[in-house]
Image (cartoon, grey):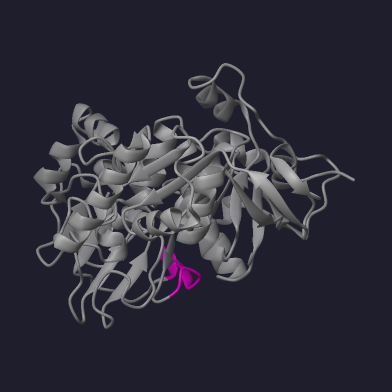
Amino acid sequence: MGKTISEKIFEKHLIEGNPVAGEFVLARVDLVLMNDITAPPAIEAFYKIGVESVFDRSKIALVPDHFTPNKDIESAMQVKMMRDFAKEQGIEHFFELGRGGVEHALLPEKGLTLPGMLIVGADSHTCTYGAVNAFATGVGSTDAAYAMALGELWFKVPETIRVNLKGRINPWITGKDIILYLIGKIGVDGARYKALEFGGELIKDLSLDSRFTIANMAIEAGAKAGIFEPDSILEEWARSFEPEPNLVYPDSDATYSEIIEIDVTEIDLQVAFPHLPSNTRNVSEINEKIFIDQVFIGSCTNGRIEDLRIAASILKGKKVAPNVRLIIIPATQEIYRQALKEGLIDIFIEAGAAVGTPTCGPCLGGHHGILAKGERALSTSNRNFVGRMGHKESEVYLSGPSVAAASAITGYIASPSEVL
């Protein structure tokens, strides 16, 4: 019987069990990730386990990004705990403020997430690394502590939904529109505890940045992982970090719980209305003017260089509407530097945007852009739940960078065609 990508990765990391969908297995992990919210409880749990050191100091990544630069004493103490633990254990991949960025953009940039790897992270959007053909999934802090101590973890091998992407991408459409379209189609529980395996003829036309966005939001459909079939684009990227990438392909006779066919030619720019990522509409079908107070372009979903370039191409020579606050945060220091080189930061500031240092910031209501009662935001982040970005009586709409930039100019949710 043929195997899916997920089953093959578990097979290669197997310690105990039968690596087929629905079965429990004990497997070796290649990387354990934690951030400044999830690391402190994981570190406390680690000490309770009774081991003296982590299983491999080169396979732990600690990334302070949610409340950094530290917004208060509590967040400063959380990061200090991470910093002290990293020093004590000799952990190689602790990314201090000013030398890192948002975890799910940073780790691929550093070559720490590669094809064929089995990755766990104490953050739900760990599934981002499926974009590079890894099986990556979020776990709780106690599970992360166990993996950090022993280098292994129990998993239930998920069933897989195959998503075949075909057709031709329309202007301004990115991975954000594709994944919002899919979530709108199947719902926030449509892939619950399953892996979404992406393939099809369109893959060769999708940038890695778009793939990261799609894999990132697999969790918003309830998926355990979102994983891409490899191609020449991924292979070239991976070879910059290792000479022979461990590319994992599905078997032609792999068993899937469902196969979804999506013709992206039919996909319009998407906007997710409050308060679910599945509450999607085509931007062309929004007839009323939905006025906004704030626009956020950034996060582990859309803070990459492709997103900043799109936003700059729309904002160039224009001004942010008087009633709107536009916040733009590059996801990593390297992305920030690249944006500086290309003149994108000048474009943003000239337009009237506030540009911030790499941090998760407004995405989770951390800091840098908290919403007040009654305020409405359009965000390129991944969640728009009640109170996600501030007051529980605020509203969050989700979109890709082109709609976000255009809406910052008009003052209401708009298509790029309205300002160009």
Query: Residue 3 location in percent, x, y?
Result: 80, 44
Residue 202, compared with residue 195, is above or below; it is above
Query: Residue 124 location in percent, x, y?
Result: 47, 59
Query: Residue 163 location in percent, x, y?
Result: 67, 52
Q: In which quadrant will I find the N terminus?
A: top right
Asked if residue 256 shows in the view, the reply is yes
Q: Is residue 282 magenta?
A: yes
On screen, residue 50 versus residue 80, left or right, reads: right
Q: Nearer the viewer, residue 48 or 225?
A: 48
- State the residue at coordinates (41%, 41%): 61
On screen, residue 322 versus residue 129, left or right, reads: left
Residue 93, compared with residue 144, is above or below; it is above
Q: Quadrant of residue 291?
A: bottom left
Asked if residue 165 shows in the view, the reply is no
Residue 111, compared with residue 189, is above or below; it is above
Q: Is residue 28 magenta?
A: no
Q: Quadrant of residue 189?
A: bottom right
- Give the residue furthest to the right: 1
On screen, residue 417 versus residue 217, left or right, reads: left
What span is in magenta? 276-285
- Give the residue furthest to the top: 243
Query: Residue 183 location in percent, x, y?
Result: 55, 64
- State the residue at coordinates (69%, 39%): 13
- State the residue at coordinates (64%, 64%): 193
- State the residue at coordinates (13%, 48%): 351
How many marks do you count on the picture? 0
Q: Nearer the viewer, residue 125 or 200?
A: 125
